[in-house]
Image: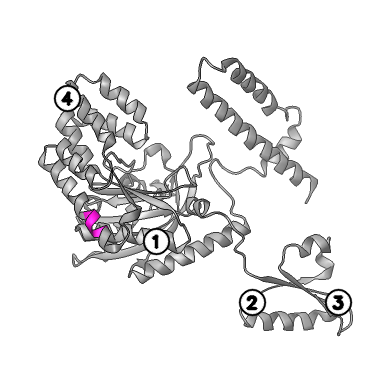
């Protein structure tokens, strides 16, 4: 490795560490403005001084910039790529067993159609202009593009359509906080079936995928956005007030939710009803409590749909991983009914989510009920645990006089399905370090008959 490259990597590691420390310090300062304020302020001062240690080294800074990546972008190194490939292969095989067909859509879509329909906040979209002046976006999710394709070409006779995808999506980050701006999703969309059985199918398929990739412990939180909307409209009377409370629920800011509810000009009874929403969690008992809390027909119907879903999931044999959370709200505004998130113990964020979106296809002039889910491959791997899944890679090291023999041996091994690297001895700088990369080594050096391992 060249010195500039080593210096560059060290600089980037230091810079990332300092950025994280700065973020943590500022976060702690918001939590404890009185306690430890002097200590944290001092930490911020010294970190800020360190961040400018490269001043006066203009040439070095320019050289180091070549190793930078755009905000939120990540490299995938070989061992992680192999693990992603294995997870992707296992899940794709299981999805196809359930009768879903894979589809690909363009990375670029029109802002006015897919961009607007995606329900991703506008500031999270990567936008650019084509040569004709049209605004394009890097696809921020896969549900909206698949809805476009289904509405225009596939959903013709009104019968259920089962589609699947495996693709990268893009969501811009405003600051470096460890969240990627590009990540891989694998998921399904069941279009044209408005029954609870369809919701149960996609949730059960998602659970089957997680089990197939070796995730032993996970839970699926299930709610109904129709229930939340009905309760809020019943008590608050308008969408503006309801949207503020939904934001607290989406952000899982339950402290802020409680404080805001207490500040509203409502009766003590209605305030208690809004606060009791947070306790509607657990098993079937939460459904009865939900029906008692919401008196409107819409709220009762939503609770009945959740009850029917639980029964269907019991038939699939996955009820043990399901937990009700009637206060569950998604940032995806196109959800209209059942919605869910899946969590693993080792990961602090949902590794997947989904739900029913019965109004999305109408935006593409082809109304149809639909449901589906998407799993984050990066978070799934974090939950499963990174392991070395690379296959047995052999390396044949040869000298010039054994070149033909080495090629013949490599081709024979590859024909058997083995992974083989063919490397001339003159191209290796450090044979000891190089040999550590491979599970086995074969040396064809000097005159024939001196093969070694």
Pointer 2 residue: 418
Camera sees residue 151 = no
Which structural element holds mark 3? loop
Crowd rating for badge 3 (residues with CA inside 10 Å; few <14, some 14–19, many 20+): many
Which structural element holds mark 2? loop
Q: Where is residue 315 drawn, in percent x and y?
A: 25, 63
Q: Where is residue 80 drawn, in percent x and y?
A: 58, 57
As measured in the structure, the alpha-carbon distance from the residue carrying label 4 to the one carrying label 1 is 47 Å
Task: For the C terminus, give its image quadrant.
Answer: bottom right
Crowd rating for badge 4 (residues with CA inside 10 Å; few <14, some 14–19, many 20+): few
Relative side of 282 to 302, left or right: right
As measured in the structure, the alpha-carbon distance from the residue carrying label 2 to the one carrying label 1 is 29 Å
As measured in the structure, the alpha-carbon distance from the residue carrying label 2 to the one carrying label 3 is 22 Å
Which structural element holds mark 1? strand
Earlier residue among tags 4 and 1: 1
Q: Image height check: is 312 above or below 93?
A: above
Mark 2 or 3, which is nearer the eye?
Answer: 2
| Stretch in magenta | 309-313
Pointer 3 residue: 445
Earlier residue among tags 2 and 3: 2
Pointer 4 residue: 269
Crowd rating for badge 2 (residues with CA inside 10 Å; few <14, some 14–19, many 20+): some
Q: Does the magenta stretch include residue 119?
A: no
Mark 2 or 4, which is nearer the eye?
Answer: 4
Q: Residue 34 carries which label?
A: none
């Amino acid at each position: 490795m060249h010195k500039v490259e080593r210096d560059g990597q060290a600089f980037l590691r230091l810079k990332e560490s300092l950025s994280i420390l700065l973020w943590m310090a500022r976060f702690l300062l918001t939590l404890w403005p009185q306690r430890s304020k002097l200590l944290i302020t001092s930490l911020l001062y010294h970190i800020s001084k360190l961040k400018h240690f490269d001043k006066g080294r203009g040439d070095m800074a320019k050289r180091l910039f070549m190793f930078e990546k755009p905000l939120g972008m990540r490299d995938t190194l070989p061992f992680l790529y192999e693990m992603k490939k294995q997870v992707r292969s296992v899940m794709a095989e299981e999805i196809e067993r359930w009768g879903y067909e894979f589809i690909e859509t363009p990375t670029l879509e029109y802002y006015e159609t897919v961009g607007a329909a995606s329900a991703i906040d506008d500031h999270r979209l990567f936008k650019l202009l084509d040569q004709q002046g049209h605004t394009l976006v890097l696809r921020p999710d896969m549900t909206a593009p698949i809805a476009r394709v289904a509405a225009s070409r596939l959903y013709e006779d009104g019968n259920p359509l089962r589609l699947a995808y495996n693709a990268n999506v893009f969501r811009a980050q405003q600051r470096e906080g460890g969240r990627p701006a590009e990540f891989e999703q694998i998921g399904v969309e069941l279009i044209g079936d408005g029954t609870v059985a369809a919701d149960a199918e996609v949730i059960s398929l998602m659970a089957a995928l997680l089990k197939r990739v070796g995730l032993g412990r996970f839970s699926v939180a299930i709610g109904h956005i129709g229930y939340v909307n009905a309760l809020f409209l019943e008590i608050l009377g308008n969408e503006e007030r309801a949207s503020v409370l939904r934001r607290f629920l989406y952000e899982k800011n339950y402290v802020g939710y409680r404080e805001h509810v207490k500040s509203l000009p409502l009766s003590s009874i209605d305030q208690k009803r809004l606060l009791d929403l947070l306790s509607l969690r657990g098993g079937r008992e939460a459904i009865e409590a939900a029906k008692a809390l919401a008196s409107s027909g819409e709220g009762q119907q939503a609770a009945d749909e959740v009850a029917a879903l639980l029964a269907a999931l019991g038939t699939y044999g996955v009820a043990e991983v399901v937990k009700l959370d009637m206060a569950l709200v998604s940032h995806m505004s196109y959800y209209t009914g059942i919605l869910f998130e899946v969590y693993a113990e080792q990961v602090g964020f949902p590794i997947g989510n989904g739900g029913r979106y019965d109004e999305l296809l109408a935006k593409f002039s082809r109304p149809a009920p639909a449901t589906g889910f998407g799993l984050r491959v990066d978070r799934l791997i974090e939950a499963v645990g990174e392991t070395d899944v690379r296959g047995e890679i052999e390396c044949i090291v040869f000298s010039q006089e054994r070149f033909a023999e080495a090629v013949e041996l490599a081709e024979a091994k590859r024909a058997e399905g083995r992974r083989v690297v063919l490397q001339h001895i003159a191209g290796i700088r450090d044979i000891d370090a190089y040999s550590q990369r491979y599970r086995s080594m074969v040396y064809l050096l000097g005159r024939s008959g001196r093969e070694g391992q």
